[in-house]
Amino acid sequence: MSHEPGASPLRDPEHQAAVQHLERLAEQLQPPLLRLEHALHGAVAFGIMPLFALANAGVPLGLGNVEATGGANVAFGIALGLLIGKPLGITLFAWAAVRLGVASLPQGVTWHLVGGAGLLGGIGFTMALFIAGLAFIGEPGLLVAAKLGILGASLLAGLGGWFVLHRASRRAL
């Protein structure tokens, strides 16, 4: 085992093995209901909750209504705002705060990580749906287009943010 000051345990296979062994032992001490909850977490978080959110958003699966009302521009505008506007705003304001001396990047945080977090900020699901509902009262075709734009952009922002953060974290190791 390396005992260099500041050495990351993530780089040492012996440390990793020891941590994984401790994790397995700790899991064996958990009550069965907690183990079941942990086992179901992935299916619920990545399957059931997104399906519930989609059903709750009230988005019809056909796109004919969007094309007929000219809602493609609405969906595209919302998607641009979530995919470009929010990440750009988050990243630029963080950069400005650091540049002006109001804030500093935490140790180990790079601008790639800030950009990835900014992309994740483009996941504008709940509040964006609420605002779209208020903005398009009486315009059901445009509301459907807005919801599709929000859902599509949120999915792309989540995937893009994950990709950027995953690549940046692999470089850091």
Image (cartoon, rainbow, N blue to C red):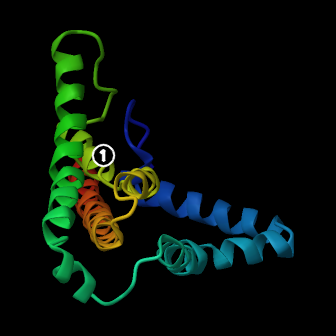
| Residue in front for this viewpoint, 94 or 53 | 53
Where 96 falls versus 156 (above or below)? above
Looking at the image, which residue is at 42% across and 58% down?
133
38 sits left or right of 69 in the view: right
Pointer 1 residue: 117
Determine whether the residue tagged by mark 1 lies in a helix, strand or loop.
helix
- Residue 42's x, y, as percent? 56, 75
* Total count of labels: 1
Looking at the image, which residue is at 19% across and 70% down?
71
160 sits left or right of 55 in the view: left
- Residue 2's x, y, as percent? 41, 44
Residue 41 falls in image quadrant:
bottom right
Where 103 falls versus 64 (above or below)? above
- Residue 115's x, y, as percent? 21, 44
Looking at the image, which residue is at 13% across and 65% down?
73
Q: What is the three-letter code of the residue carrying label 1? A: Ala
| Residue in front for this viewpoint, 96 or 67 | 67
Where 16 falls versus 41 (above or below)? above
Looking at the image, which residue is at 27% across and 54% down?
165
Instruction: Using a 10 Å C-alpha cutoff, classify the residue at mark 1 as few (fewer than 14 neighbours), some (14 to 19) or many (20 or more).
Output: many
- Residue 101's x, y, as percent? 23, 9
Where 117 falls versus 100 (above or below)? below
